[in-house]
Amino acid sequence: MFEHSRGVRSAGRVKAVLVSLDFGLRNATESLGELRQLASSAGVDCSAVVGGRRERPDPKHFAGAGKVEEIRARAAESHADLVIFNHELSPAQQRNLETTLGCRILDRVSLILDIFGQRARSHEGKLQVELAQLEYLATRLVRGWTHLERQRGARGTMGGMGEKQIEVDRRLIGKRVKALKDQLVRLKRQRLVQRRARVRGQVMSVSLVGYTNTGKSTLFNALTRAGAYAADQLFATLDTTTRRVHLPEAGALVISDTVGFIRDLPHTLVAAFRATLEETIHADLLLHVVDASSPSRDAQTGEVNRVLGEIGAADIPQIFVWNKIDLNDMAPGLERDEYGKICRVRLSAATGEGVEFLRLALTEVATARNAVNHPEPQQII
C-alpha cells in the first residue's frame, strides 16, 4: 500500500473520538452502538463520543463549526489522536477535517475496510480486500500529497516538467487494480469448475447469510463440526468456508458460511466481494440467520435482504433461523407457512438447543429437491 494510505493498523491500538450525528434517518443509539463495535473490532479504544442532530451535512466539514470545535476539545481532553465519523465523508471533507483538527480522520467506510484488511485470511480474500482498498484510495490520493509539483522529464536544467506525483500514483494503482481483477477472474473460473462438479453430483448447496455477529459461524460449526473461527465481534470471519454434511434421510449437501452483512456496507466491498458472495448467488437454499435477541432484528433482516437483492440472490428460497434464543428465553421450535413448508426455526447455536429442528428443515428441503431431480418411475398398468 502507498505511504499515504493510513489506517488503524499502522498505529496499533489507539484512542479515538467517535462522532455520530443524527440526521433522523435511523436509530441514533443503535447506530452509535454499532460504531463502538466496529471501532473495538479494529483495535481502537473509544475515549470520547460526540453526538448531535443536524438536518443535513455541512459541505465543508460534514459537522457544523460549533460541533467541529467540540470534537477538537474532546480529542484534546482525552489525548486522542484519531477521530472516527460514523458516516461516509467526501475526500474534501476528510481533508478539511484533518487540517482543522490536526489529527487523523477515518470515516465509516475506511474503518470497515481496515477491519476487512485485518481479518482476511485466504489468498482470494486478501486480493478482494486489497482491490477494495485501492479503489477507495484512488478517489482520495490528493489527501496524501502536500507537494503537487511535476517531476522533471529529463536531467539537467533544461529538462521539462513531467507528470505530477499524483498522476504517477494513479497509474500505479490502475495497474495493480487490473492485476488483482485478473487474478480474481482466474479464481472465479476455478470455483465455477468446482460448482459444476457439485451440480453434476446433484449435491444441494446451502449458504448461511445474515447480519454480522448474528452467530453464523457458530451455527456453521454446530451443523458441520468444522471448527471455523467464531467470536463475539463484527466481521469475525470474512472468507467463505464450505463443508459437506450428510443427512441420514436425505443424503449429502454442501453448507457455506459467508461474510456477514452490515448497514451502509461500502459499495467497493460489495463489488470486490461479489466473487465470495457467488456462493450465495448460486445456492439452492439460504439460511438467513437472525439475532433473535436484538431489538434491531427487523432492520437488520431488511438490510440483508436489500444487499441480497443487489447481488442477484433475492429470489433464492430462504429459511429464517432465529438464533440466540437463550438470551431472551424464547422456546426452540419451527414455524410453517401457508403451504406447509418450514419458514422459520428458533434455536441457539451456542447451546445446541433447537439445532435438530434446523436439521429437520434441511432434510425436508433436500428430500423434496431429490424427488424433483430423481422422480420415481411410474408403473405401467
Image (spheres, grey):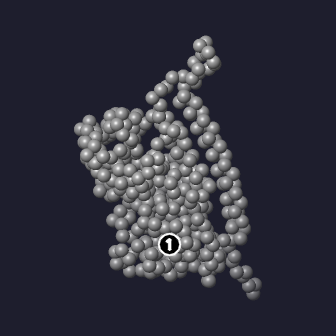
Residue 229 point in image, percent of width and height: 52, 67
Disc 1 marks which residue?
Answer: 219
Residue at the extreme bottom: 381
User: Between residues 178 and 285, which one lies in front from this camera angle?
Assistant: 178
Asked if residue 141 is positioned above or below residue 261 in the image, the reply reads above
Q: Say left or right for 78 vs 41.
A: left
- Which amino acid lies under the numbered mark 1 shown in the image of this protein? Leu
Quadrant of the image containing the N terminus = top right
Residue at the extreme right: 380
Residue at 72% over, 65% down: 197
User: Between residues 150 and 317, which one lies in front from this camera angle?
Assistant: 150
Q: Is residue 284 visible?
A: no
Asked if residue 9 is positioned above or below residue 223 in the image, the reply reads above
Question: Disc 1 on helix, strand or loop?
Answer: helix
Residue at 39% over, 75% down: 325
Residue 335 point in image, percent of width and height: 44, 77
Residue at 62% over, 41% down: 176
Residue count near mark 1 (Cα–Cα under 10 Å), binned few <14, some 14–19, many ≥20: many
